[in-house]
Amino acid sequence: MATADDRRAIEYAKCAADAAYACDTYGLIDDSQGHGDGAGTMPFRLWPAQVRVMWALQVQRLVLILKARQLGISWICCWYALWLCFWQPGKVVLLFSKGQNEANELIRRITALYQRLPDWMRDAGPQLIKDNTEELGWDNGSMIRSLPASPGAGRSFTASLVILDEAAFLLFADQLYTALKPTIDAGGQLVILSTANGIGNLFHKLWTKAAAG
């Protein structure tokens, strides 16, 4: 008969293999609109469309997402960044958004997702050794950093994953994209997501080219 430790080891392995399963089973997000049980959090139960997004993040190197509000896309990207760093060693994740405060909000969400994991899961995984408003680091060598969306930001890194949030609103989007693309060309991953913001910006140009194949 399987012991409690055996069952937890199986659960840990299942989560390591499937970010969507891990999120749907153990993800707890903020409950800012009172949909949960009053504890301030609610389970992140994924809709079928959200599962498809999570799987795209796991299997595609270049991902472009046109999002709308209240669809949980930013939370999905935050969970994916946590999953990548918690269950895989030596990952470097860079986060960019409209401003430093917005990028730091992504760090806050990732921190919250990590802290809300079951105690046994956090104990079984790598330990968090750096925790501040702009950087998280684990003792398996993985790290997540938020950076200002300035023209040359992130140029010195070799990134495993770069997330550009609200890319249609970034002031230096073209220059930032030019600087960051080489950081992932050795095998890293680039995820660009945004709500719409008119035409002519980098996000619109990339979306138009992607839609055209």
Image (tube, rainbow, N blue to C red):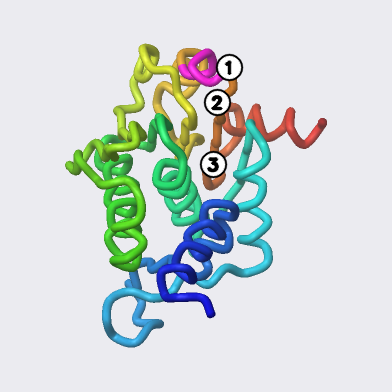
Point out the stretch of residues depicted in magenta: 180-186
Badge 3 amino acid: Leu
**Disc sitting over residue 81 in the figure:** none
Badge 2 amino acid: Gly
| Left or right relative to 18: residue 128 | left
**Disc sitting over residue 193 in the figure:** 3
For residue 170, which quarter of the picture?
Answer: top left
Assess whether mark 3 and mark 1 are in contact (beta carbons under 8 angstroms): no
Residue holding disc 1? 185
Is 174 within the magenta? no
User: How far apart, in angstroms, are the residues tagged by discs 2 and 1?
Assistant: 6 Å
Number of the front mark, 3 or 2: 2
Q: Is mark 3 on a helix, strand or loop?
A: strand
User: How far apart, in angstroms, are the residues tagged by discs 1 and 3?
Assistant: 19 Å
| Left or right relative to 207: residue 73 | left
Residue placed at 29% from the left, 85% from the top?
38
